[in-house]
């Protein structure tokens, strides 16, 4: 047998030994494959895939305009806050927060319009008892959106009232218009008697419109209902009152309105009619919420929480399994004296490391693929991209982690130390790989810690392949490839140093 | 004259751990076709010596050469000629006995055809498929032996190879060692059994890391200062005259101990006969006259005790 054949035989012997060791620990295999799968399945089943709706108690006077608006807006804000009641008892709110039966307490001030009358926004106090930073951000978002919706509801309600009044005004003006026409003809003809009668009739007709006019004027002067779109109506309604006063004065004089007065009255009527026509077509809901968002993700398919988590689980499992097996295998062989035995024989550090590398990479890759298959075929998690790309990605993650684990085994002197080191890597992976939080939300240079673990580019690549249906590539592949080269070089260097210095026993 | 170069040459070999000398000033040569025994009490430095000789540890003092090179820098082809059987054999519990020996064969590049004969040699051919995790301590040790010796290395360091083995298997193992010696293979064996040491070509008694005795097995009694003894038992009334007669006969002062009147002699049988004749001439009737040949265990204990006393005197 040539030297190459002898080398292959040694490497193969080490690899087969590793595979036999693993295959004869069925509990280990069950734990590493079924364990993470069961956890993922439980997470998928347990997660409430619904909008964040915070259980909210409103505290304030029942007859407050804001309370009315809250009741009105219930349908719209219930996506963000789930009103559980209205009370004047603030203590009840505190009790609910402390006991966990409430998420939010919204305290409405006793006189919510006071601030507005001073030209300032009114502050609504929002109390919560959350200590979860992520949940706090969620509460902030939900509260801001709910308050914005509340504001829009106030505007919509007020505008609706105004437009109803405008409709009443329009109906009331209908019979007044012939009187106005008669007045104009009489004034033009110099028929004072007819003009007086027409002016009297027109004034009476316009007086019957006092209720809608009052409503419109209240709307135009009420700070809670002030919107720019109603300003013309405010002016027109005022001129209509002026026209009535002018007509009454001409009747009282006994000669009826002169030409200028008739023209003023006519102009007021025309303006009101024009305004009614213009504003009558407004939709209060549209004015209050003129824009809606049409969110169009590039990935059109649904992305459930477990879909998003699954690629990270696969990457983390492949990494953790490979690293643990490699590190423990080397330390265990050292403790048992197997390394010392091999070192005295015609075996080099590279022979041992390569043998272990091949066997453990194959094992971790196969385990990762089994988990991926279970995710896809049992849990229904999408696999939109190429299986080959997914397998290759898992393989490189596993290979890099095996090399990293072998390096850790040189650093750690015993199984306990190695286990702790591997756990440390797992923790770094959990926090910095983008598994829990998006990696781009972390500050540099600490975020670079994520570049030290293969699950960081691995998770991103598997998400691209599984959820976006893209092929593996880009920066992530360069990072993973670099990690692989560095890890293999480190393992060979550390292993050879251990071998040379006799630290194998 | 033996022209074959020694496989192992150690001079002034020592290993310190801080102020503690595990091994000190050890000179050792191991020739091909020889078995060297390292014996001594626990903690005497036997295992450390093996680790130094095999290159698992670097010496802090002195030098050691194996096949003419430092054992820590042996070439691959030289390492094929060397093996170590540690006190706890390097075994993988998940493997079967046959797989363990096969692993050794594969990593040492020897024919797998030797696996079953090697197991048979240690009486394990009927347990080839037993997992090491399920094997007894004796079976594990024998598997370690088979895995170590399957490659027929020229030089083997064995750390207590027969510990925990029953007498029958011990005999088989020593028979195997003798066969290897006959084929020109060399071994350095540590043991706590003086009778095993007596089977070796050379016995080195280590105490507190230093060589107390380095001799052939036959010279151990001499090194221990032990001689054959004649023990004479007489009636209490005859003790004084018998004492005087014996002293005059052997020209030395006997001792009286629990056994009787004892005197050391180089040829105990003839001295016993002379004493019997002299006692008869003077009408002293002995109850018994026995000769006692000291055993190797006594020699070992004497050597170790003497070395301890010397060390205390030095200090």
Image (cartoon, rainbow, N blue to C red):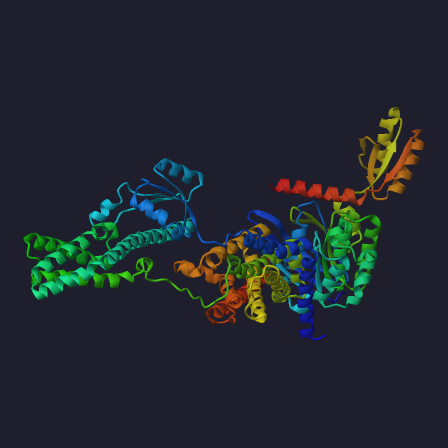
What residue sits 78% from the left and 52% below the top? B139
Q: Residue furthest top?
A: B237
Q: Who is closer to the viewer here, B77 or B165?
A: B165
Number of numbered discs visible in the structure rendering: 0
Residue at image location 79% in from the left, 45% down from the top: B296
Eyeballing the image, is B20 above or below B117?
above
Query: Does residue A356 appear to the left or right of B117 in the view shown?
Result: left
Measured from the top left, where is residue A292 in percent x and y? Answer: 36, 62
Q: In which quarter of the image is residue A270?
A: bottom left
Residue A86 located left or right of residue B302: left
Query: Residue placed at 77% from the left, 68% from the top?
Result: B111
Q: Quadrant of the C terminus of chain B?
A: top right
Tell me the quarter of the image containing the N terminus of chain B: bottom right
In percent of the image, x 91 and y 33: which residue is there? B288
Taking the image as drawn, is residue A131 in sight?
A: no
Residue A260 shows in the view: yes
Q: Position of residue A485 (x, y in %)?
A: 52, 68
The answer to whether A96 appears left or right of A46 in the picture is left
A442 sits left or right of B134 in the view = left
Q: In this view, does A457 lie above or below B203?
A: below
The image position of residue B314, as x and y in percent, is: 61, 42
Q: Quadrant of residue A282?
A: bottom left
Task: Single out the residue that lies furthest toward the bottom.
Answer: A2
Residue A74: x percent and y percent? Answer: 39, 49
**A280 or A365: nearer the eye?**
A280
Towards the viewer: A151 or A195: A195
- Residue B181 falls in image quadrant: bottom right
């Amino acid at each position: 047998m040539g030297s190459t054949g002898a080398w292959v035989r040694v490497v193969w012997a080490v690899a087969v030994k590793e595979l036999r060791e693993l295959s004869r620990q069925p509990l280990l295999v069950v734990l590493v494959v079924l364990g993470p799968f069961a956890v993922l399945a439980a997470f998928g089943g347990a997660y409430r895939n619904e909008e964040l709706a915070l259980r909210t108690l409103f505290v304030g006077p029942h007859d407050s305009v804001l309370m009315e608006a809250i009741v009105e807006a219930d349908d719209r804000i219930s996506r963000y806050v789930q009103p559980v009641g209205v009370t004047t008892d603030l203590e009840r709110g505190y009790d609910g927060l402390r006991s966990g039966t409430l998420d939010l307490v919204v305290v409405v001030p006793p006189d919510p319009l006071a601030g507005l009358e001073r030209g300032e926004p009114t502050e609504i106090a929002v109390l919560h008892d959350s200590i979860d930073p992520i949940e706090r951000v969620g509460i902030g978002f939900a509260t801001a959106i709910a308050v914005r919706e509340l504001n829009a509801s106030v505007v919509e309600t007020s505008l609706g009232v105004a437009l109803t009044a405008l409709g009443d005004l329009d109906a009331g003006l209908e019979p007044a218009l012939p009187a106005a026409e008669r007045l104009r003809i009489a004034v033009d003809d110099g028929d004072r008697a007819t003009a007086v009668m027409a002016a009297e009739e027109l004034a009476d007709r316009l007086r019957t419109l006092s209720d809608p006019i009052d409503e419109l004027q209240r709307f135009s002067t009420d700070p809670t209902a002030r919107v720019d779109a109603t300003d013309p109506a405010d002016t027109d309604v005022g001129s209509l009152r002026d026209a009535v006063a002018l007509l009454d004065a001409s009747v009282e004089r006994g000669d009826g309105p002169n030409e200028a007065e008739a023209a003023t009255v006519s102009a007021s009527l025309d303006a009101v009619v024009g305004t009614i026509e213009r504003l009558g077509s407004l939709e209060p809901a549209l004015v209050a919420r003129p824009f809606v968002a049409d969110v169009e993700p590039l990935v059109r398919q649904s992305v459930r929480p477990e879909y998003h988590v699954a690629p990270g689980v696969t990457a983390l499992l492949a990494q953790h399994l490979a690293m643990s097996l490699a590190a423990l295998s080397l330390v265990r062989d050292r403790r048992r004296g197997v390394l010392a035995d091999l070192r005295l024989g015609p075996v080099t550090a590279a022979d041992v490391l390569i043998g272990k590398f091949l066997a453990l990479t194959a094992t971790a890759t196969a385990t990762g693929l089994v988990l991926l298959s279970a995710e896809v075929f049992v849990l229904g998690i999408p696999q939109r991209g190429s299986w080959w790309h997914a397998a290759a990605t898992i393989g490189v993650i596993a290979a890099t982690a095996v090399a990293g684990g072998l390096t850790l085994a040189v650093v750690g002197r015993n199984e306990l130390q190695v286990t702790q080191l591997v756990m440390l890597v797992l923790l770094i992976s959990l926090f910095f790989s983008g598994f829990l939080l998006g990696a781009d939300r972390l500050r540099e240079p600490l975020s670079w810690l994520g570049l030290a673990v293969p699950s960081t580019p691995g998770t991103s690549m598997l998400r691209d392949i599984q959820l976006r249906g893209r092929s593996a590539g880009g920066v992530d592949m360069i990072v993973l490839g670099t990690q692989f080269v560095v890890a293999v070089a480190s393992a060979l260097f550390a292993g050879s140093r251990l071998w040379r210095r006799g630290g194998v026993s | 004259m033996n022209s074959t170069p020694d496989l192992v040459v150690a001079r002034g070999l020592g290993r310190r751990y801080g102020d503690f000398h595990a091994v000190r000033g050890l000179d050792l040569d191991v020739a091909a076709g020889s078995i060297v025994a390292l014996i001594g009490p626990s903690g005497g430095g036997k295992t450390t010596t093996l680790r130094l000789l095999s290159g698992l540890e670097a010496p802090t003092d002195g030098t050691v050469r194996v096949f003419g090179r430092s054992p820590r820098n042996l070439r691959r082809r030289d390492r094929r000629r060397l093996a170590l059987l540690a006190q706890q054999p390097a075994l993988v519990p998940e493997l079967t006995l046959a797989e363990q020996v096969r692993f050794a064969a594969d990593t040492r590049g020897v024919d797998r055809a030797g696996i079953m004969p090697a197991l048979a040699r240690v009486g394990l051919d009927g347990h080839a498929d037993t997992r090491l995790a399920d094997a007894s301590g004796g079976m594990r040790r024998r598997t370690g032996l088979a895995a170590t010796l399957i490659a027929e290395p020229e030089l083997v360091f064995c750390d207590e190879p027969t510990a925990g083995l029953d007498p029958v298997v011990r005999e088989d193992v020593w028979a195997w060692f003798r066969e290897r010696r006959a084929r020109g293979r060399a071994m350095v064996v540590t043991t706590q059994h003086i009778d095993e040491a007596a089977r070796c070509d050379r016995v080195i008694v280590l105490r507190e890391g230093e060589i107390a005795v380095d001799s052939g097995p036959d010279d151990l009694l001499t090194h221990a200062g032990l001689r054959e003894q004649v023990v004479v038992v007489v009636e209490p009334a005859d003790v004084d005259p018998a004492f005087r007669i014996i002293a005059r006969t052997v020209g030395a002062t006997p001792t009286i101990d629990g056994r009787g009147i004892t005197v050391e002699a180089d040829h105990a049988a003839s001295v016993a006969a002379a004493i019997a004749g002299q006692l008869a001439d003077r009408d002293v009737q002995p109850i018994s006259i026995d000769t006692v040949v000291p055993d190797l265990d006594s020699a070992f204990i004497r050597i170790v005790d003497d070395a301890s006393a010397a060390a205390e005197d030095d200090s």
